[in-house]
């Protein structure tokens, strides 16, 4: 390692490189950016969460000067409860982000021992050789920041998650002037959000959604139920603004929504006129066209309030034909089927339903291609590294950078664990540290590996057949008939004949020689072979076969 | 049942109502339309296919006059091998559809005993009280048809899958004139494709894709590899046309692609100039910019040729940086992650990759809202039933029908199994026959029910723990220590302590009273409780617990 170069390492994001964590190293100092989580992909059966692999940092704890958080979304703060216990590192974030982190750590009973620090937008903090300036950017949550990080070899700009909205809900646009000023002074490296690098043009302003919400609030004949992400504070503000404008009261439902509204309001990020919020009891006395309900459930989450309404099993709110329901979000990839089912069920109940495929109910929080180019043009970086995206997003983003003048030899498409080493003169990927996503399943963090996942996949496809064979330990001969128990393989009520025949086949094979059974391990693998082959021939399925040999 | 009314019953489509099969009944006569299959939804673990539930028809076999197929896609022909053995019914279809059906039945060794009949577009056939006229419509496969079905109470039009493309690849547009003529004569009922009822405007013409393909063929510096559906014969034609225009030879790869190209060419639906098709050996002698490869794999299917190329394990074709790869299809919902991974891997190998999110590589085969309205306006039906779509599509399509003048009381949003009874004067849903999707898993058709699926889901989440307890049948006391075997629950190498502690807990609980164990069923449920509680407390996971009590 060259001591006079900067090292840049993306440390996680489940395919979205550097989304959940980035590390910058210079000399002995390490700066971490974000500590988020991802939800598992479809084949990661039973996994609850995926968090960054911090094993590279374990023997370097003392060198970590600080952890800086760009904004308060789960994919940037969600891993804190899993990471802070091993790394007692000071955390820096803007007020709303701080509030959301505090709630999370409190839930995990980690708040007291954590070192949380609030930073105002515009502030600069000093962490080892690094100094970090927090710049405002637009995103789908207030108080989102980009970072301008001064290092001994030059300025690094980390875009955070951003878009360039000239009419944002909170009235504070991305700081073009400051980014341009930094660009004029000279930027060594730009790390920039690639999430929407596939999208041509500009991401529409949040205003589009505000206009849509106003139209619905004014026209809807009954209640307006708006579902959105609990973290989408600015969307909640838009719903409240539109509701107030058309004389509707607002009820908030869903545990996480209630918590986030409370904290955002306390911190001044949500402006709610006195008397606007009402409770369930007040609803009964209000005319339906004076009511708005804000709920969770845009991703079809089975226990969310919207999904329970759609299924007709919400304890308090029954959907009626005059209701208007707005799903103000797009489905996260993988959730489409659940979301579609929710929409179908709402239509079945007779509601009018608006969702992203048919209406302007949502704009996303990331810049499209023209905005990405603008960020590069403003900051004029010497080196460019696309982050926050899967490989194709990074590649396309790199092409955009070439288009606006960053030469390919100074553009690096990295993967998690890659180590980029650079100074003004040279930059190259010098190393790849061992990296593998860390799975959280229940209380287990990192204890689930490929073997367990492969077993779950096998079990999910064709189930399991447990075969119990009792043998006499003196004679080595099989005693009685084997027992077969299956789960997830065939319908037990209709498969008696198949199971009995399988027993026959096993008995015959094991008694074949007239000799004893031999060593238990050998017998087990024999049973596995025989039963596996027989059952596959009969059903064309391959259940997991688990032989149990009991010697008595 | 009123003998002088027409009965209309959608019989399957896994949420897409009537997509796979529709039944029309009048008096004693039954006419079936299509016999397709669907691929399982995510939670249908291990299921291979879903086919229509024909149990309603089982005791009415003699009354079925015929099965008419609208076009040759899997969701309209794929269930034939499962249904024909139980219903020896004559099948009618246009030549290409007939060819594709023949291949399929041959594979299943059912061709000889099937009664397949070829019908030319424009022909009318008589089946009991019904007469069926085959009308040309545009879709993403040639020889697609709508049906004009004369019944004693009036004309029923079944749209098939359609769009209105004025510049289709095969040069044969949807028959506006004939539809309008039927509309002028009087249409009782329109059953119309709702797949794209969410899409505003018009579906772009196939020509858009042709233009894109020509541009790439002319500009690409090396090989052009185009992946598409094997059934998308017109897309294959476009690829061949563009390749020929720019002096490229064409190699076809992928089992199903090779088979479909062969049959479409034999039947004259694919026009390939002599000397255009080449084999693998010829490729080596050709300059890369003289080569086009047509492959399967647009859905990220692990064994398809494109995915093997992307993973670098295709036996013959290695992707190199000058290759251009086009995925000429959109991901089917549920396949996004696999498709994205394929694209990422192609980018990793340095190829230029074009896909639906960023380029005009594909147009879909179904009409958008303006086309759906045009179909209704042309046919001016007395009754309207949206089919081929999930509930939200049907609902939106019904709204379109209201907009163009079909009153709500004569529009029926149906679900599979609903029975609509109508004549000119009245129409209403009078009944719902028992209906449940039929799952195919390996050789089993319909033998997998909710119990098996629920078990597979449980197994996929947290795995299974088998607990073997041996007891002395005279004393009723536990002998030795229990055995615990887990799969998909915890990493066995790292969980010794947990497993040993679980054994202790079980032994302690079972030996507690000093008495015998009691009845085996009771002991089993005791073990299940104790172990389940203990393991959940320790891990927050809920593996399936399978107790095995061996009495010796």
Image (cartoon, coloured by chain):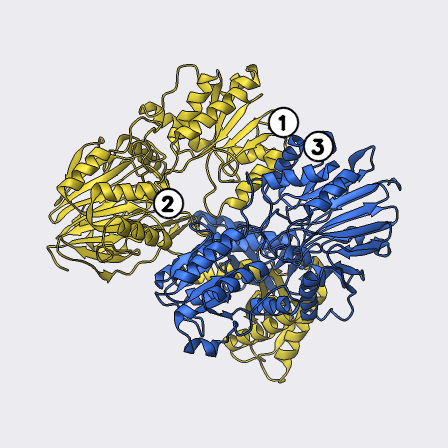
Chain colours: A yellow, B blue
The quarter of the picture where the N terminus of chain A appears is bottom left
Asked whether the beta carbons under mark 3 and mark 2 sit within 8 Å of each other, the answer is no
Q: Which residue does the numbered mark 2 point to in the structure image?
A: A196
- Which x, y percent locates residue B141? 62, 57
Above/below status of B284 relative to A25:
below
Can residue B523 be seen from the camera position used here? no
In the rendered image, the vertical position of residue B59 relative to residue A258, given as above or below: below
In the displayed structure image, the side of residue B479 where residue B474 appears, left or right: right
- On the same chain, marks 3 and 1? The answer is no
Relative side of B504 to B2, left or right: left
Q: Are marks 2 and 1 on the same chain?
A: yes
The chain letter for the residue carrying disc 1 is A
Q: Is residue B262 left or right of residue A166?
A: right
Numbered disc in front, either 2 or 1:
2
C-alpha span from label 2 to label 1: 37 Å
Residue A121, image x, y percentages: 23, 31
Dot 1 corresponds to which residue?
A321
Element at label 1? loop
Q: Where residue A513 is drawn, which disc sits there?
A: none
Q: Secondary structure at mark 3?
A: loop
**Residue under the image location 79 percent in, 51 percent down:** B132
**Residue A275 at what x, y percent from top left?**
43, 14
Residues A193 and B408: in front is B408
Looking at the image, which is closer to me, B124 or A347?
B124
* Residue lying at 53% horizontally and 36% vertically, measured from the top left: A358
Residue under label 3, please give it: B406
Q: Earlier in the sequence, mark 2 or mark 1?
A: 2
The local crowd at label 2, few if under 14, some if 14 to 19, many if 20 or more residues have their Cα within 10 Å, is: many
């Amino acid at each position: 390692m060259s001591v006079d170069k900067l090292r840049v390492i993306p440390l996680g994001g489940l395919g979205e490189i550097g989304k959940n964590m980035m590390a910058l190293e210079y000399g002995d100092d390490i700066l971490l950016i974000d500590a988020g989580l991802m939800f598992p992909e479809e084949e990661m059966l039973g996994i609850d969460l995926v968090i960054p692999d911090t094993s590279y940092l374990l023997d370097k704890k003392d060198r970590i000067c600080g952890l800086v958080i760009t904004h308060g979304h789960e994919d940037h703060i969600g891993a804190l409860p899993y990471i802070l216990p091993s790394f007692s590192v000071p955390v820096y974030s803007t007020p709303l982000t701080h509030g959301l982190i505090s709630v999370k750590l409190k839930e995990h009973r980690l708040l007291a021992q954590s070192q949380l620090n609030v930073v105002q937008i515009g502030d600069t903090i000093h962490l080892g050789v690094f100094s970090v300036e927090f710049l405002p950017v637009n995103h789908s949550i207030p108080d989102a920041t980009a970072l301008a990080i001064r290092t001994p070899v030059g300025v690094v700009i980390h875009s955070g998650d951003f878009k360039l909205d000239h009419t944002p809900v909170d009235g504070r646009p991305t700081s073009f002037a400051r980014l341009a000023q930094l660009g004029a002074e000279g930027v060594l490296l730009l790390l920039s959000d690639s999430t929407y690098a596939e999208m041509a043009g500009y991401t529409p302003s949040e205003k589009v959604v505000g206009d849509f919400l106003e139209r619905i609030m004014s026209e809807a004949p009954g209640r307006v139920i708006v579902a959105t992400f609990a973290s989408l504070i600015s969307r909640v503000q838009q719903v409240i603004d539109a509701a107030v404008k058309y004389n509707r009261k607002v009820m908030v439902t869903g545990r996480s929504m209630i918590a986030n509204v409370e904290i955002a309001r306390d911190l001044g990020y949500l402006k709610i006129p006195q008397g606007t919020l009402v409770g369930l009891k007040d609803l009964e006395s209000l005319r339906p066209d004076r009511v708005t309900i804000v709920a969770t459930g845009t991703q079809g989450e089975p226990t969310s309030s919207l999904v329970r309404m759609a299924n007709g099993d919400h304890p308090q709110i029954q959907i009626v034909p005059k209701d208007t329901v707005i799903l103000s979000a797009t489905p996260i990839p993988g959730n489409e089927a659940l979301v579609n089912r929710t929409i179908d069920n709402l239509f079945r109940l007779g509601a009018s339903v608006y969702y992203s495929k048919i209406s302007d109910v949502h704009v996303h929080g990331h810049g499209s291609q023209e905005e990405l180019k603008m960020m590069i043009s403003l900051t004029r970086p010497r080196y460019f590294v696309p982050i926050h995206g899967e490989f194709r997003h990074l590649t396309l983003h790199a092409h955009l950078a070439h288009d606006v003048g960053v030469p390919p030899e100074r553009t690096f498409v990295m993967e998690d664990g890659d180590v980029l080493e650079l100074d003004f003169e040279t930059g190259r990927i010098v190393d790849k540290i061992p990296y593998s996503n860390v799975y959280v399943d229940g209380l287990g963090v990192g204890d689930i590996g490929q073997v367990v996942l492969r077993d779950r996949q096998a079990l999910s496809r064709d189930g399991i057949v447990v075969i119990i064979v009792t043998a006499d330990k003196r004679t080595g001969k099989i005693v009685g008939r084997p027992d077969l128990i299956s789960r997830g393989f065939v319908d037990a009520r209709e498969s008696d004949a198949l199971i009995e025949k399988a027993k026959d086949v096993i008995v015959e094979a094991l008694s074949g020689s007239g000799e004893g059974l031999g060593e238990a391990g050998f017998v087990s693998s024999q049973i596995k072979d025989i039963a596996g082959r027989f059952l596959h021939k009969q059903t064309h399925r391959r259940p997991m076969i688990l032989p149990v040999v009991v010697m008595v």
